[in-house]
Amino acid sequence: MFTDFINTILTNYGLYAFAIIFVIIFIETGLVFFPFLPGDSLLFMTGASIAKSGYNPVPFIMLLASAAIIGDYVNYSLGKKYGLSLRKVPFLGKFIKDTHIAETEQFFAKYGSLAISLGRFVPIVRTFIPFISGIGRMDQKQFLIYNCIGGLSWVLIGILSGFFFGSIPFVQSHFEMIMLAIIVISVLPIVFVAIKRHLNHK
């Protein structure tokens, strides 16, 4: 399993493991071909490992937030320059699925520019949001603002959750449920705002 792989590199490679994690975070957010990488669990496990090792989490948060932000910008640039023509790339193109694109477009239609920040907390969607933003020729400055907010927030919440709670047995045994709860709680305020706007426009 991927989680076993992460545990192995964190245990055996020490600080060098964070270079590997940087690359994984960058690939998940930066290359539209790899939406299946589990970024949420990776950040949580990284936070737990940092706590166990006694390191200060701040440098690692900044490092991995940089990976997420740079990755999203690369993905945005790919969408802007190549668009859906990337689906023609042998083997890799099959990972750009119609269902993923449709789901992302619906998310974008619902939340507008905020989708760039919020999409970070939704698996699959977070990989396609910057790509779709590039295809739609979204203003680069506006994209960068929401990209930085979303990238830092996602990494901060993921790592600090693992840092403070990763060693608790209950958390370890209910990891998937807790990550889902974190995602739901993160998105709820925006859902309420969207509902309020919808009601006000009636």
Image (cartoon, rainbow, N blue to C red):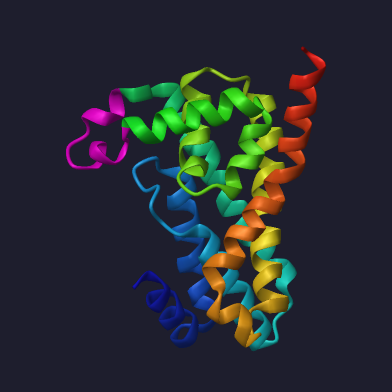
In the image, what residue occupies the spot 44% across and 51% down? 28
- Residue occupying the point 29% across, 41% down: 95
Q: Quadrant of the N terminus?
A: bottom left
Give the percent coordinates (x, y) of residue 184. 65, 51
Farthest left residue in view: 90
Residue lying at 62% horizontally and 78% vertically, measured from the top left: 171
- Residue 88 in the image: state x and y as whole percent: 21, 28
Q: Is residue 167 left or right of residue 130?
A: right
Residue that extends furthest to the top in the rendered view of this protein? 202
Q: Residue visible at 48% across and 32% down?
A: 104
Q: Position of residue 101 (x, y in %)?
A: 40, 30
In the rendered image, which quarter is residue 107 located in? Answer: top right
**In this rendering, would 112 be left or right of 195?**
left
Q: Nearer the viewer, residue 71 or 96?
A: 96
Q: Which SS type dominates the magenta stretch?
A: helix
Q: Is residue 62 visible?
A: no
Is residue 139 part of the magenta span, yes or no?
A: no
Residue situated in front as seen by the camera: 141 or 196: 196
Residue 170 visible? The answer is: yes
- Is 140 situated above or below 45? above
Q: Quadrant of residue 93?
A: top left
Q: Is residue 6 above or below residue 35?
A: below
Front-lying residue, 86 or 20: 86
Residue nearer the viewer, 195 or 35:
195
User: Vertically, is 155 above or below 118?
Assistant: below
Report the span colored magenta.
Answer: 85-97
Q: Is residue 90 magenta?
A: yes
Quadrant position of residue 124 = top left
